[in-house]
Image (spheres, rainbow, N blue to C red):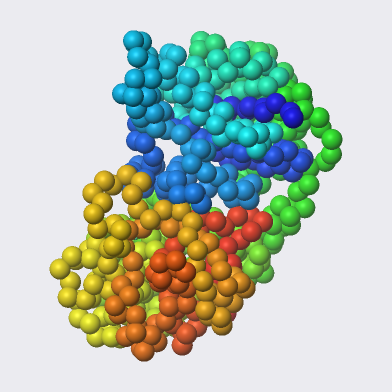
Amino acid sequence: MRDVKYVFVTGGVTSSLGKGIISASLAKLLQARGYSVTIQKLDPYINVDPGTLNPYEHGECYVTLDGAETDLDLGHYERFLNVPTSQENNVTTGRIYQSVINKERKGDYLGKTVQVIPHITDEIKRRIKLVSSGNKFDIVITEIGGTVGDIESLPYIESVRQLKWELGAQNCIVIHLTLVPYLSSTGESKTKPTQHSVKELLETGIQPDVLVLRTERHLNEDLKRKVALFCNVEESAVIESVDVSTIYEVPIKMLDQGLDNTVLRKLALPIESEPLLTEWREFLTKLKNPKHAIKVGLVGKYVELPDAYKSIAESFIHSGAVNECEIDVVYIHSEDITEKNVSDRLSGLNGILVAPGFGSRGIDGKILTAKYARENNIPFLGICLGMQCAVIEFARNVLMLEGAHSTEINHKTKYPVIDLMEEQKSIIDKGGTMRLGGYKCVLTKNSKAYKSYRKIEIIERHRHRYEFNDKYLNEFKNHGMVPVGINPESNLVEIIEIPDHKWFVGVQFHPEYSSTVVNPHPLFVNFVKACIG
Ligand code: GLN
């Protein structure tokens, strides 16, 4: 059995340079060369997980099949690799401290002073190794959140330094991602911030093995040589990451510069074959050569920050490509939609998606949107709260249950068509207590959902507390909104449809979390088909 090899990805100069995409791209190339790879994200904040964070703070909260609420970068990892991630793939400072403090209370360190070094760093190292326990992977790529020099990330960087020393240079390498800004006034790309950032990393005892330079413009060989010389890195290990039109092109750009070869060589791993990227390249060709074009409205309350709906946006890219269709996703603020302007706001759209969410802000606009899509026969996909809004709307305007609502928004409603699940009623803690992760769902034959999945039983990921209230099931059925997906264990309604409508589907789960480049989600694929018409 081979030793597990570790690649760490750190960031310098500024945040948001795309460490997640570089990590995912490298992983893709290594996977395409036959290695089994996983990617882990270490986040320096004190929240135990991002589940309690407002999307405005940190973008979408991504959910794994095993029910972890995680950083959105895990979504990129899955979309690139087509391999599910799990609880172990995202670790926060909060989680690290929580385990150490729990151990301290149990008396595991009896008599000792518990300190950042060695106790916190040992726990970090344990978590890094845990992701590949049982030798599931040949290579683990670990992305360290934040920027080198941040107070919060110091224990992580120190853990990497220790691991490098413990495991040896051939088993553990560091890729440092920095920015080379372009100064238009002088027409130059500047390397100084990169030099400073590498110095900062050196101060913590780490010499990076590979440098990836984010840049707006191509960097010439002289500049790369200069960076290599001043930062003590091989010339072939200085890689540029120039802005591209789609993140899915980054693996190809990295391949062209031999990032995968450099990494494998440094890790003393054999480079046996050319990477197998046929499906990936086919996807890119389709993405870039669309035959159709549609406009889809995404109605939500976090639209100022598109990262809040990252997985939905990416699902549209995957499903657009298979359908050879360019999708213009129009972000529409649900708070801006009123009874008066709804038809103006939503006119000209080929399809409408109502987004997931929590709480009452913008809910009326979402309900009005569902009504507009239903009455005007516009393809509609409601996800989680989006599905619940479609149910509320139907109850009010078709079943004539005035004031019908979800008890999340109005706990005194006379008609609680969406209500808290029994097992949720006694829970008061907010963190990690929702219905989370994969649950089975059995589909009704001939439904639009069945025609999309083309199988009876599916597993989809959840993140919610409220449910369709069974008490009203018959009334809905009798009036033309039918359940077509049921959880076989709990009997909960998972999917509703209006068979008389062109394409009207509401799902209690989150299809967007499991759409990948090589496996675009069937519901998105068929929704887009319906939008094309
Ligand atoms: N707020 C709703 C619930 O908890 C929907 C959640 C969601 O859209 N993810 O049930």
Q: Is residue 525 above or below residue 514?
A: below
The image quadrant that residue 410 belongs to is bottom left
Indicate the quadrant containing the C terminus: top left, top right, bottom left or bottom right: bottom right
Q: Residue at 23% x, 66% y: name it.
A: 407
Number of labelled discs?
Answer: 0
Q: Residue at 34% x, 71% y: name it.
A: 468
Q: Residue at 44% x, 66% y: name it.
A: 489
| In the displayed structure image, the side of residue 383 where residue 282 appears, left or right | right
* Res 410 seen here: yes
* Res 178 seen here: no
Residue 227 spot, x, y in % from top left:
64, 19
| In the displayed structure image, the side of residue 59 where residue 177 appears, left or right | right
Residue 117 spot, x, y in % from top left:
43, 13
The image quadrant that residue 165 belongs to is top right
Indicate the quadrant containing the N terminus: top left, top right, bottom left or bottom right: top right
Residue 18 spot, x, y in % from top left:
54, 37
Q: Is residue 92 above or below residue 73?
A: above
Residue 153 spot, x, y in % from top left:
44, 23
Front-most of 451 and 79? Answer: 451
Front-most of 233 and 39? Answer: 39
Q: Is residue 100 above or below residue 63?
A: above
| In the displayed structure image, the side of residue 328 where residue 418 appears, left or right | left
Q: Is residue 282 above or below residue 268?
A: below
Q: Residue at 39% x, 63% y: name it.
A: 384
Front-most of 53 and 122? Answer: 122
